Image (cartoon, helix red, strand yellow):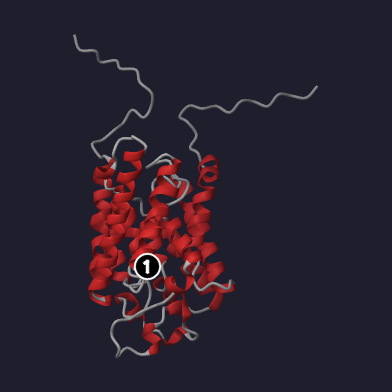
Amino acid sequence: MENRLIVTASPHITDMVDTQRLMGNVVISLIPCVVASAVIFGMRALALEAVTVAACVFFEWLYTKLMKKPNPVADLSAVVTGLILALNFPVSLPYWIAVVGAFVSIVLVKQLFGGIGMNFANPALVGRLVLFSGFATRMTTWTYPDAAVDQLASATPLQVQNVYRLDLWDLFLGIHGGVLGEVCALACLMGFVWLVFTKTISPAIPVTYVLTVFVCSWIAEGDIEYGLIAILSGGLLFGAIFMATDYVTSPFTLKGKLVFGLFMGVVTFAIRYWGSLAEGVSYAILLGNLITPYINKLTMQTPLGYVKPAKKGGN
């Protein structure tokens, strides 16, 4: 007779989704950004992305081989890290610096902490920040391939003194300088639609994050156009969609996701508006990653049927 009573530890509801399928969906969602980077910056963008992905896959394979651990390359997580990392680079970045970033992301941040699911922060995010600290000039050299484009379009929008000179449509399509993945808002939104449609991510974090920056910027300047410029400039959309939604380093409850997005939005706005840095997305996400365990603890759902113990009276 079939045993219909199976006693196991939670979770009790499972599906057929595995890591490879989830990572595959993320890869597909990044394709619009990859295509946009090639159209806007030329074929060197594709070469830089290919080198970074290959380096990430190689370092993951080499580390697990040397440590005699199972080879996780097939789960595509290294490919996702490589793509996200590469899309955080300016097109002029030397290939060898991209390889250094891949080593930091895969070996130092991911594998040394136990591999996928054990990292304290998004590996690509930390790799970008390390390169930004060590190779600041190279990481902030914005190159636009069309020599006919004027100085306004060549600079990243966050470095323009009078932001009202920026055209919202140009910002949306990516007709300006910046890193490979952040310039085209349309490509980022196409990836967002795919991730939500396939239920790979919840829209709670990206929507809360972007909306917070928009509202704070609008209130600060009293102009809705300034708020729109703020969300279309820099790496906000790319970071909110592809980096802040990392499963391991983001909260798992809906309330926690909302708090997480709100926190990062406020930090990003504060750095941009009052800080000396033009961009604040990477630092905001890193801080959010570090406080995620506390957010999870504070927003943990109450178990069904749980009754809070009564306080003992004093003597």
> For numbered disc 1, what is the local secondary structure?
loop
Residue 166 location (% of width, % of height): 40, 84
Task: Between residue 146 and residue 315, name the one nearer to us.
Answer: 146
Residue 299, horizontal then vertical, whole percent: 52, 42
Q: Is residue 299 above or below residue 95?
A: above
Q: Nearer the viewer, residue 41 or 213?
A: 41
User: Which residue shows up at 43% across the image and 41% down it?
Assistant: 118
Q: Quadrant of residue 230?
A: bottom left
> On the picture, is 280 further left or further right than 117?
right
Q: Position of residue 86 (x, y in %)?
A: 33, 63
Q: Residue 204: tell me if it is visible.
A: no
Between residues 274 and 180, which one lies in front from this camera angle?
180
Placement of 154 over or under 253, stated as above or below: below
Residue 225 against residue 286 in the figure, above or below: below
Outermost residue on the front side: it is 66
Q: Amino acid at mark 1?
A: Phe
Choose between 4 and 192: the one closer to the eye. Answer: 192
Residue 79 visible (yes or no): yes
User: What residue is rendered at 30% in x and 88% in y?
Assistant: 147
Name the outermost residue toward the left. 1
Residue 18, horizontal then vertical, whole percent? 26, 39
The quarter holding residue 314 reads top right
